[in-house]
């Protein structure tokens, strides 16, 4: 396990994969104390372990497609969408 010196990277620890496997409980405990943990493979950062609540905050709630369209500023704008007939005909004209 090594502590990073870069300011941006100073908030987390980096573990090599073997140490992370052997000391997973410690890694998780540190993570739950608010320290994101980085696991490196072959010396290169590979994954970040975060508390689940922080992951949810970063990803945000999943929105359904229906909700997305319902909150659209174009809702109720009575848009007319027309398709070019030649495009539709070209799509339907299929040789078997």
Image (spheres, helix red, strand yellow):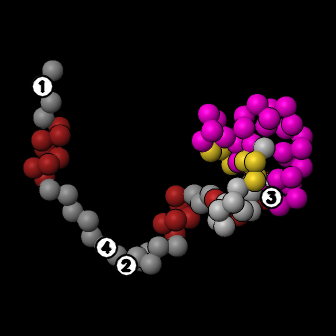
Q: Nearer the viewer, mark 1 or mark 3?
A: 3
Regarding residue 55, the answer to whether it shows in the image is no
In this rendering, position of residue 18 left or right of residue 72: right
Confirm or deny contact between disc 4 and disc 2 (CB under 8 A).
yes
Which structural element holds mark 1?
loop
Q: In the rendered structure, which disc, 2 or 3, sits on the residue that comes first in sequence?
A: 3
Q: What is the x, y in percent for residue 20?
A: 79, 37
Residue 65 placed where, x, y %? 52, 58
Q: Residue at x 76, y 31 (%)?
A: 18
Q: Are marks 1 and 4 in contact (CB under 8 Å)?
A: no
Decide: is 8 above or below 50. Answer: below
Dot 1 crowding, Cα within 10 Å, few <14, some 14–19, many 20+? few
> How dense is the environment of label 4, judged by Cα within 10 Å: few (below 14), some, or many (20 and up)?
few
Name the quadrant containing residue 22.
top right
The residue that mark 3 highlights is 35
Q: Which labelled disc corresponds to residue 77?
A: 2
* Quadrant of the snapshot with the C terminus: top left
Q: Which residues are magenta?
A: 15-44
Question: How far apart, in angstroms, are the residues tagged by discs 4 and 2?
Answer: 6 Å
Q: Residue at x 52, y 65 (%)?
A: 68
| Secondary structure category for the residue under label 3 | loop
Q: CA distance from mark 1 to mark 3?
A: 61 Å
The residue that disc 1 covers is 95
Which quarter of the image is occupied by the N terminus? Answer: top right
C-alpha gap between disc 3 and disc 4 = 50 Å
Tell me the residue at 65%/62% (across/down).
Answer: 6
In the image, residue 2 lies at what x, y percent? Answer: 76, 48
Q: Which mark is residue 79?
A: 4
């Amino acid at each position: 396990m090594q502590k990073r010196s870069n300011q941006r990277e100073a908030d987390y620890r980096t573990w090599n994969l073997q140490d992370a496997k052997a000391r997973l409980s410690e890694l998780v405990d540190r993570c739950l104390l608010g320290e994101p943990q980085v696991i490196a493979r072959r010396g290169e950062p590979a994954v970040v372990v975060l508390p689940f609540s922080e992951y949810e905050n970063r990803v945000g709630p999943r929105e359904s497609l229906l909700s997305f369209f319902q909150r659209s500023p174009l809702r109720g704008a009575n848009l007319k969408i027309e398709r070019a007939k030649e495009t539709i005909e070209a799509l339907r004209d299929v040789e078997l």
